[in-house]
Amino acid sequence: MTGEKRKQRNQKQRHKGKMHLVKNCALSIFLILLVLLPACSAQKTGMTDTGEEAKELVVIGFSQLGNESDWRIANTESMVNTFTEEAGYELLMDDARQSQEKQIAAIRNFILREVDYIVLAPVVISGWEEVLSEARDAGVPVIVMDRRVETEDDSLYTAWVGSDMKAEGERAVRWLEECLKEQGRENEEISIVHIQGSLNSSAQLGRTAGLDEGLAAHDNWKLAARECGEFTQAKAYEIMRDILKVSKDVDVVYCENDNEAFGVMDALEEAGLTCGKDGDVILISFDATELGLTACMDGLINLNVECNPLHGPRVEKIISTLEAGGTPPKESYVEETVFEPEMLTEELIQKRGY
């Protein structure tokens, strides 16, 4: 990765970070006002300035797991932009900052506030039975978004919408098989570094399972290291930096999201190694965010597996079905693809919206 491209990427990240900070500050002020004015929040109907009865709003309690990545920020923005007062909704959002305990507390608070629906983007897959039982007993439908929950009784939640994370991992493995064949290296020993996402999340479990199947099917694929990067650039950089201090014998780095890939790029550059289409190291990433795809288009990421974060309209479709007395599908998968450098243009990236 050239210093200029790295500089451009970091400038874009800082710009996006500033914009997200402004949006998050505005959202925080909005939520504080909701807390300070509980009587107004609890009143779903009222009178407009013209004396007409105001439209009743559908109240949504949204527990977001955090803002650890560009993907997550885009996911939050999709929800905020979908569930507006103009569209007939009141959105109460809580940022759990990667804490399941905070998510459980938020769900209980939503139940006490008698919201109409709860949307949960769970930080981990297990440990939800008790609080989801409380929501069901209170008659509040729960829609799980993005990552999954694991329960013995699937009636504890109404519907789930998101990506098939294991299928994403399988797509990456199939691509790597073909890539190595094209390079004439299918029988060579291949050293793979695996940077995992947040442990026990369905994204980590699925993408790890896909790679594990590939490792089991190829005796010459060797797992040189496997560490948790927490879906963040900083943690992935630290991990990769320490790995390269021990050995630079790395053929493939399998990162479970774009932010981890950025951290790996920085560590590789510091170690005097290159990555991507014409580099020393094959770099695989997931999510296909705007910055991730730009790095892929520039030849710095060999493969970026799509994981679409724009779930706001999908969740709204589920709620509209429920409001109309219908029954939505229990599970709704998002159609996704993979991207290589030659497939991408600036126009295509800008049209995607995240």
Image (spheres, helix red, strand yellow):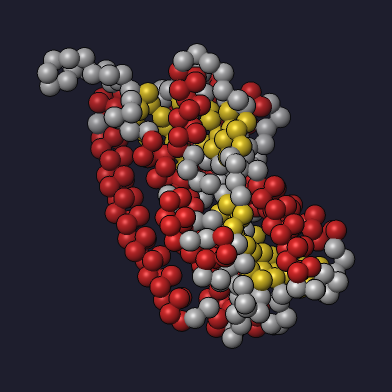
**Residue 344, position as x, y percentages in the image:** 52, 60
How many numbered discs sit on the rendered protein? 0
Horizontal side of 220 relative to 249 (left or right) equals right
Residue at 56% x, 23% y is 328
The answer to whether 246 is drawn above or below residue 30 in the figure is below
Residue at 79% x, 68% y is 181
- Residue at the far bottom: name it: 272
- Residue at the far left: name it: 50
Occupied quadrant, residue 208: bottom right
- The foreground one among 75 and 21 is 75
Occupied quadrant, residue 20: bottom left
Q: Is residue 158 visible?
A: yes
**Residue 53, position as x, y percentages in the image:** 21, 14
- The foreground one among 97 and 11 is 11
Occupied quadrant, residue 150: top right
The answer to whether 282 is drawn above or below residue 172 in the figure is below
**Residue 50, position as x, y percentages in the image:** 12, 18
Residue at 70% x, 47% y is 167
The answer to whether 217 is drawn above or below residue 235 in the figure is above
Residue at 72% x, 75% y is 251
Q: Can residue 237 be seen in this view?
A: no
**Residue 336, position as x, y percentages in the image:** 60, 46
Horizontal side of 58 relative to 43 (left or right) equals right
